Every structure is written in structure tokens, then in C-alpha cells.
Image (spheres, helix red, strand yellow):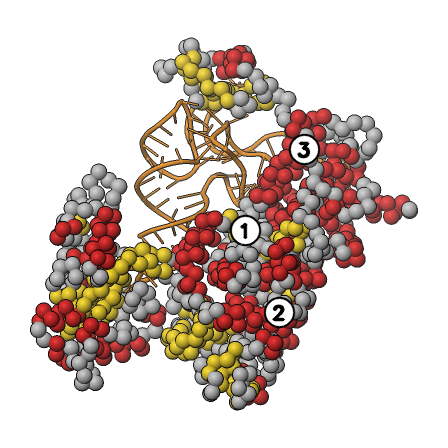
Amino acid sequence: MTDTASVAADTYDATSIERKWQARWERDGTNHTDVQAGVRPYYTLMMFPYPSAEGLHVGNLFAFTGNDIHGRFQRQQGHTVFEPFGYDAFGIHSENYALKIGVNPMQLIPRNIDNFRRQVKRAGIMIDWRYELSTTDPSYYKWTQWLFLQLFKRGLAYKKRAAVNWCPVDKTVLANEQVIAGECERCGAKVEQRLLEQWFFRITDYAGRLLENLDRLDWSESTKAAQRNWIGRSEGAEIVFRVQDYLELAGAATVIPESTGELPAPDLIDIRVFTTRPDTIFGATYLVLAPEHPLVDRLTTDDQRTSVAEYRASAAKKDIVSRKVTKEKTGVFTGAYAINPATSQPIPIWVADYVLMEYGTGAIMAVPGHDERDFSFATTFGLPIVRVVAGHGENEHTPLAEPYEDSEDPARLVNSGPFSGLKVSEAKHAIVDWIEEHQRGRGVTNYRLHDWCISRQRYWGPPIPIIYCDKCGTVPVPETDLPVELPEVEDFRPDDSGVSPLARVESWYRVKCPSCGGMGRRETDVSDTFLDSSWYFLRYPSVGRDDVAFDAALTEKWLPVDSYIGGNEHAVLHMLYSRFITMVLHDAGLVSFDEPFIRFRAHGTIVRDGAKMSKSRGNVVVPDEYIDRWGADSFRTYLMFLGPYEEGGDFQDKSISGVKRFLDRLWSSALDSRRTGKPDVAVMRKLHKTIRKVGEDVPKLSYNTAIAAMMEYMNVLRAGERSPHRDEVEPLVQLVAPFAPHMAEEIWERFGHKRSILDSGWPEFDPDLAADELVTIAVQVGGKTRGTVQVTPDATQDAAVAAALADPNIARFVTTDPSRVVYVKGRLLNIVVAAK
RNA sequence: GCCCGGGUGGCGGAACGGUAGACGCAGAGGACUCAAAAUCCUCCGCUGGCAACAGCGUGCGAGUUCGAGUCUCGCCCCGGGCACCA
């Protein structure tokens, strides 16, 4: 070795070291996972990205790095870790970009993927690339289509004509969640309503289970809360209000003319309403039906027919936005009445668009005395307002007070016949019982959750594997014919015909019916991207298998996922759909578990200098630039240091230097370290405390405090002129390895180790060394801290008091005999003196 | 309106009910250097004080406690989810 070489070798050059180790890992298969035989399997998953043309966002890298550190830590704990990577590359996002630059996504996506792979490798993420997947690969979406067929087979996929959100700019149906405040999430255009035939999955069948299971999942609380909100359970009752009762009472069945001229079967004119407040039924002074309610026609009297028709037409024209946002109540009287089963009084039936057909029964009993919306409607149209619940300090002029239970004087029912005097919760039960007894309804639970519309009138997605045949109807594509490949077409631009661009490719959609061999036509819609991502975690261990979606044995070995990390923007849809699909597969006997992710942690978001990153602001962090300048190790470690992982933090360019300095000091300490002599006892004590602290923090994802602890140790290690002992440095390198894997490998090799530091294990701390010899405890007099004193950790109270009183600055505050002494070993001493 | 987070120095952030501000950035002073960078050392919440030290201090107001950033109650503000959902 020449002198120059040794000088160069002693300078920490991140770029060459990182290049060297990335090549070495690839050559040696260091990151490979033995999915068949690996012991103590640990599946650590990050949400796979959409491979955008811009390349990896720093937010992606924040997520991947956090997951990677977790995975590397688990590997050093002796687990066989599986940390796969893939791409969620179908969908409107890719397609819109492809349209913009006029290149078919089939050409575009592979380029983006190459760039993403390069960037992820550069960041030193411990991926086994043999299990990489892309949802756009026919070998993947073959099984996405298979999944659709499994749901179809089980009656969980169905087609219905439905009012859908239609974006007039993107010219496609949007899922509810893609509509933000009535506007298209992508282009901001005002969303319209359209009626189309759509495929739906019956996720609502699973609403109760999806909600209940949340209680036993180890997930970020915010994520569970978001799912609870989305599922939106509410308990109440369905109550029947009969028009027939009114007709009998009035003795005039002709009040309700039938448009066909025939009299309706009177017993069909039951109006079922949903309410969460059955206790207020005595205050129900009118009924409201949604404009789309099927009974409206039959109920409307001749003299009201014109105004009702006009009202319904105008409601139908209104887009979802203005219908939901408008606060002023509109509506029209049908001319018909029903009988309130509680009061036996006739009440008018109205139509109003503040009642939604999609929720409950599409009809409500209006209780203007206790509901803000009903109150405002009743006020507008001069309908009667009756108070049926009253608490202290309330009267008829405070009609909207919340019922309360937990006070001395709880709200009680009034004006409610035999139920008057009951507390609200008692009355709810009593009235539901009464209704059930009289067969006028039943207690029910409703959910806000809607069925999942998976149809997309788009090009860039997996074709839904269905064939329509005039003779046989809707025929599933036989599993042996999968995949139904997406054809490469010149013109993939959507139009406003309401059908997918695939409907223009006759050569593709004209097929024989698999059932009768006659002429058939393929379904030309593709499926939602969220279907692609609802099962990718099941595919990873089985990537490469052409015969099954997921191998049974491998799935049992690796799933459910041990640790899942991702952003809370997917807290609801992706996470809920994945859970739903897993439950369906469980019920089909295809997997043994019914929840896919044992533990989920939402990572925070990163802002830049206190502001949200955005292209228009020009403050986007481009990872490549930072890795060029600081190296991947420094960049990774800084990302983990800038704030609590689950909260995110503020990216400040200047602050990276602190982390870089720390790694530089680790490098020079390691190279300076000697094997001669003995390690310093005080340093070793600090080292063992650090091993304990880092070992506690890393599994909790408390990366920022783990790094702070290592920095603290570095400050102790480098105090004074001495060069450190090898034993003082070597375990630290193992602690740093998950954060700065390249540098750790390089030092490890220079220390003479032959195998990757990943397989070196995790240092153990010696509890005796990690314990303190002397502790500094706070001394308070009357609760005010007056000084500190050094004692042994197990010093008695008397010894601590004696030590404290020996300090004149403490003693001078103890003016009288202590009335009490509080002593917490190793923490503090509080000498309580009587107040003056 | 309901449901989750959060509010701590100039900044990012630490803190089992027990010395508030660890760690890092920025800043000030010093060493080394012809000089700069890098590196190393010291200081660094506010007010008063030469100092020792004292008083004040974790969004606001009460409370519980020997002791509250932390627990309870009532508010304010910021971020996110849901929302004419009956």
C-alpha cells in the first residue's frame, strides 16, 4: 500500500463507499431473502409507490428509509426479513400524465420504474429485487382479474346502474373519495352526476366486521379513527309510517290516485324511515322522502303532481356539490299524509333534497323540535314544531339542545304519552321495544360506508374479466383464459361517451361467449387501481409463480404482514379495501387470517422550512441532489433525525451537517481505535446505556431519539485527547448500521469481519454497566428545585436528606422541621416544610 | 358540528407525574491557520445580578398533587379525517 492510498483510505468518501457496498450486496445476494426456508420470518412492508415521471419524492424515501431501518434492525435481531418492493403503476395518475405528453403508458411506465429502482438502490434500501412487482405486468394483473372472479363467484361483485360522480374534464367516473368538496381531486373541475352501469363490490356486507376488528389491530390511532369515521356506524331504528292508516282514518282511499288509474295495493304504501332518535317519535310532525324515493309517484296527489314533478326534475339536475353544500332548505308537499304510529295523528309527507336516497331508507321522520335540519325546514315551510325532550333550563325557544344523560338532572321525555319522564337512553330502548311489539319497525344499525365501485371508464387498468352474451347474459371469463390482456392501442384518450376507450377496439372486445360459443362482447371497463393495491402484499412472496396468485404455504409462512408503514393519505381506502379483500379470501378458505396487517404505523409528512413542499413553491427536495452532495448514509440518517417518525418534521438543509458531522466522527473514531490497553470504564458505561436506549427506541420507530442517543455517546467517546478502544466503537457501528448501512459495512470490514454487518447480530447491553454508579438527584424544598446532590442509586432517604442538607444553599431554605419528605430513588428528594 | 393528532428557546425537537429545553441547527467567543474552509474548546430560555444566586417560563383559565409540559375540567389556535348521514 502506498502512502497516498492509505491517506485516501482514511478519508470518508461516501460516494465511493456507497457504490462499493451496493455492488457488493448485489454480487453477494446480501439482501436476498430465503422465502422458502428462512427461519423466524419477518415481513416488513412499505406502501409501494406510484412510479411518477418526476422520480422518487423525498416523502417516498422517508417512508422507505423508516421501513428499511426497521427491517435491518429485525435482521440484526436474527429474523429472516422480507422487505419487498414494487410499483402501483396502473391508474388515472399515469394515464393522465401519458395523455399530457402523448406517450402510451405502456412505454412510459417501464422508464419510470427503471428510474425508481435506481433511486431506491442508491438509497441503500435492503430490497430483494427478485421479488419486485408491478401491478401493470400481465403476470400480476392476471391475478387481479382472478380476484375479481373470486368475488363474482361469491356474489360479492354485482352490476348496477348508479348515479356516479362524473368528472367532465377527465371524462371518467370518480370514486366518492376522489371527490374533494364536490370537485375532482385531480383537476379541480366541478363534479357532475351521471347514471352508468357499474361493477360494485359488496364491502358493506363487511362493514360491521371491518369496524369491530379495528379494536384488536395494533395500528396508529389516527388511522383507526379515520376508518371508523369512514365506516360511520350509527344505531337506531327503522320505523314504519303507514299511509294506509291515514286512508282508513279519512275513509277516502282515492286521496292517492295511481298514475295508471288503478288503485294501489294499500298495504304497500308503508313508508320506512331510519332514525337514530326513536325516542323523539312523538315529536315527528312530518315525513320527508328523498326526491328519488320510489314511492313519491304513488303518494303525490293530483293537485301537487306538477310542483312535485318540477321539484324532482330540478333536484335531479343539481350536481352533488350544490345539493350537499346548500344550506337553505327546499322541498315540496306531496299532498299525502301518513299516521305517526306513536301519536296516531296524521302528518304530512314532503319531498326534499336534504334527505339522501343512498343513506338509511331514503326517508326520514322529521323532528323539528330536536334536529337542526328539520327545524330549519319546518321554519321555512311553517310546519309544527313539538318538543318531546326537555332538560333543565330548556324551553320551547331552545329547540336544539343536545340531550344529556350524565348530570344530576338529565334530559327526559315530555309530551310522549306513556314514555314521558324516561331518560333519553331509556326511552330509546323502550320505544324500539314498543315499535317491535306492534310490528311497526325494528332496531337497526346503519353504516355510512357505500359499496365499492370498481368500474373505471378508462384505458390504463386491468380489463374486468367479464363477457356479455345475448344468450347467456353476464359470463365470467374462465380462469384458464386469464389474463385478459390490455391491448396496446394508439388512441387511449377517454371521451364523454361514458364508456372506456377499449369500447372503440372492436377486434379486442368481440369474442366468443365462453359458455355457448356464440357472439359475445367483453366488458370494456377496467378496474380501480385500489383493487390492484388491495392484494399486492399477498403476491410478493409468490412473485414468479405462474400457477397461483399466492402460494398457500408461502402465504402461511409470511403473512399477515408483521410491520406495515405508509402514509395516512391511504388510511381509509387502500387500507380498508385490503382488509376487505383479505376477509373475503379468508371466508373463501384461501387464507387463514382475516386481517392483512398486524401492525401499521403511519409516518408523518415532511415539510420544508416550515412550508408544504410543492412544485409551484419550488421547495421540493430532490433526493438525488442530496445523495450526491451528502451521501445516502447522511441523507437517510438526517431524514430519520429531523423529527419523530410518526409526526414527520421540517426539512432544513443546514441541519444535515449535524448528522454528517456525527458520521464523520464515527468514521475517524473507528479508524483511530486501538486494540491495546483497556476500554475506559466511564465510556463503557455510557456505551451500554446507549445500547439499551437504541434497542428500545428503534422498534418503537423513535428514530430521532435513537440517533440523539448515539450522538450523545459520540460526545462522550470523543471527549479528551485519547484514541478510543476498539471495544468502545465496535458495538456502536452495529447500532448505526440500520441508519448508515454503507459506512457501517465499510468499518466492519476494516475491523476484520468477513460477513456482512447485517448478520453480525445486535449488541447486548450489560445491565450492571448500564446502571449508574452515582446518580444526580434533584432536591426540592417545598416542591421548588433548590439544587442537586450526588448519591448512590440505592441511597436511603436518610442518606439523601443528609447529603442534601450538607449543601448550604439547600439547607437555607429548610427553615423549619420538614413536615414530610418525599424521596424517589434515583430521581428526586422533596423536603416539604410547613407553609409560612 | 363530530372524531383523531398537535401547540415547549431564534429554529428542528427531548422529557416513566420527579432537575423543562437532551440531541442537532443557527448564533457568540476562543484555539489552530498568512488566510479561509475543515476541526477542536467554551457559552447560549427570559429578567435582575460582577457573581453566588433569585424570580419568571411548556397556547389561555381553573383544579388534583409534596411536585404538572405530562393527569382532570373549561376554552383558544394549528394540522388531518367525516359531514344536510337523519
Q: Where is residue A576? Give x, y as percent.
A: 48, 59
Q: Is residue A599 above or below residue B55?
A: below
User: Label 3, label 2: how many angstroms apart (C-alpha)?
Assistant: 46 Å
At 71% across and 62% down in the image, what residue appears?
A130
Q: Where is residue A792? Give x, y as percent.
A: 60, 19
Q: In this view, does A374 lie above or below B61?
A: below
- Report whether B42 appears left or right of A313: right
Q: Which of A504/A57 is in front? A: A504
Q: Which of B33/A612 is in front? A: A612
Snapshot quadrant of residue A364: bottom left
Q: In this view, does A516 lie above or below A298?
A: below
Crowd rating for badge 2 (residues with CA inside 10 Å; few <14, some 14–19, many 20+): many
Crowd rating for badge 1 (residues with CA inside 10 Å; few <14, some 14–19, many 20+): some
**Which residue is denoted by mark 3 in the rendering?**
A765
**Which residue is denoted by mark 2 in the rendering?**
A140
- Report whether A327 appears left or right of A749: left
Q: Mark 1 lies on which chain?
A: A
Snapshot quadrant of residue A294: bottom left
